[in-house]
Amino acid sequence: MPTPHNNAPTGAFAKVVLMPGDPLRAKWIAETFLVNAELVNTVRGINGYTGYTKNGKRISVMASGMGMASIGIYSHELFNVYDVDAIIRIGTSGSYDKDVKLGDIVLAQASSTESNWSAQFNLNGGTLSAVADFDLLYAAFEEAKRKGIKVHAGNVLATDHFYNFDKEVWKRWAAVGIKAVEMEAYSLYVNAALQKKRALCMLTISDSFVQSGELTPEQRQTGLSDMIEIAIGAAERFC
């Protein structure tokens, strides 16, 4: 049934949804990697599509928008209203690690944050650690290994700030082992935990705090084929 943010009918989404941030990237993925992809949501330009992989597995792809608040809304509705079982975020990120270079892929084993997202649960001053679903993580790792694609796995930072006033804060996160920074994984992982669902965040490094250069906007949108193929291969195991 439709929601304030989604006009897809019941059953329109597959059990597994790939979720990039950019609606144009979602469109490109549906047109490039899926067969007979059907547009199922258009509210606010956050396009969602459902189609089939080349192996005949039904999956969906839908944009999340930017930030934890946005993916928090869409993941909540997909899990709760549309009975989606798993969401794989496929996004871009900035590297905090000299060994994680431009174009590399990171599997977010866990997500740290400086957001107050978990404050709503009143954990008596505690901090909720947000982690990926192990089976999804393992499936993606195996798929990358099968394809001969190197991936990194570890902790990432989900931040509210693309432009941070504190220009040196990244060094403190890097010192405690954070591999990369993005803006969505934490709330996605928490929503999945709440609903007893599966979630994984996969990231392609588009820029770096420790080396020069960055991917162009065009490369960010369409140059992420290795990550998407790993995500589809992992998703097929849960369709």
Image (cartoon, rainbow, N blue to C red):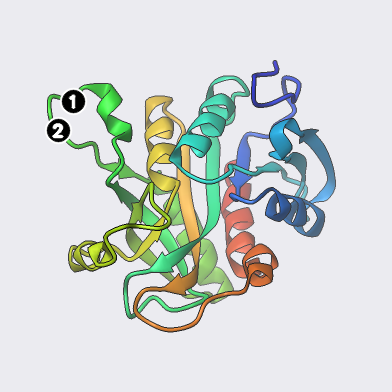
The residue type indicated by label 2 comes to: Gly
Regarding mark 1 in the picture, which secondary structure is present there?
Answer: loop
Count of number-bearing discs: 2
Q: Which mark is residue 92?
A: none
- 103, above or below 47, in the image: below
In screen coordinates, is 41 left or right of 72?
Answer: right
Q: Residue furthest left?
A: 125
- 38, above or below 107, in the image: above
In screen coordinates, is 60 left or right of 189?
Answer: right
Q: Which mark is residue 123?
A: 1
- 164, above or below 6, in the image: below
In screen coordinates, is 62 left or right of 172?
Answer: right
Binning the other alpha carbons within 10 Å of mark 1 as few (below 14), some (14 to 19) or many (20 upward) gives few
Res 138 → quadrant = bottom left
Binning the other alpha carbons within 10 Å of mark 2 as few (below 14), some (14 to 19) or many (20 upward) gives few
Say which residue appears at 18% left-offset and 68% top-offset: 175
Quarter of the figure that contains the N terminus: top right
Which residue occupies the foreground of this view, 145 or 107? Answer: 107
Residue 18 % position (x, y)? 61, 46
Res 98 → quadrant = bottom left
The residue type indicated by label 1 comes to: Leu
Task: Determine whether label 2 and label 1 are within 8 Å by CB.
Answer: yes
Q: Residue furthest bottom?
A: 212
Q: Residue furthest top?
A: 1
Residue 41 % position (x, y)? 75, 32
Quarter of the figure that contains the C terminus: top right
Say which residue appears at 32% left-offset and 74% top-offset: 97
On the image, numbered disc 2 is attached to which residue? 126
Distance Cα–Cα, label 2 vs label 1: 5 Å
Residue 108 % position (x, y)? 39, 56
Res 28 → quadrant = bottom right
Say which residue appears at 58% left-offset and 72% top-offset: 147
